[in-house]
Image (tube, rainbow, N blue to C red):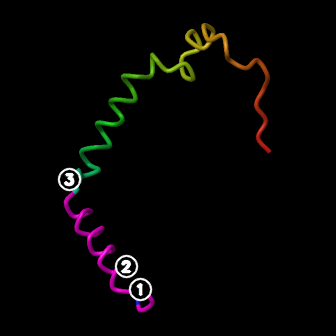
Amino acid sequence: MDELDETQLNAHVESLKQQLGYNREKTSVSIPELATWIEEKMAEDPFLNPDILKENPWVETGKCVVL
């Protein structure tokens, strides 16, 4: 922080003040909500539902190889 001039320090302080204003939610609340949302959307996901994947005309027929 010794190398920062006054303008940079002021910008950093303003950024920290803005971050303090964010409404944060506990992960104990948000993770179960996210898991529920994912489970509800699984039937619509073409990567998880092979019936929908068959309807996609743009799906690649080749195999994916990870190096």
The amino acid beneath tag 2 is Gln
Whole-number angstrom distance, CA of label 3 to CA of label 2: 25 Å
The amino acid beneath tag 3 is Asn
Please provide percent x and percent y for residue 55: 60, 7
Whole-number angstrom distance, CA of label 1 to CA of label 3: 29 Å
**In the rendered image, which quarter is residue 9 located in?**
bottom left
Instruction: Answer with mark 3 or mark 2, whichever residue precedes in sequence.
Output: 2
Q: Secondary structure at mark 1?
A: loop
The amino acid beneath tag 1 is Leu
What residue is shown at x 29% (from left), y 50% (from top)?
Answer: 27
Instruction: Answer with mark 1 or mark 3, whichever residue precedes in sequence.
Output: 1
11 versus 1 height, above or below: above
In the rendered structure, the answer to whether residue 52 lies left or right of residue 27 reads right
Residue closer to the observer: 4 or 35: 4
Our reading of the magenta stretch's main secondary structure is: helix
Question: Start and end of the magenta stretch?
Answer: 2-21
63 versus 16 height, above or below: above
Residue under label 3: 23
**In the rendered image, which quarter is residue 33 located in?**
top left
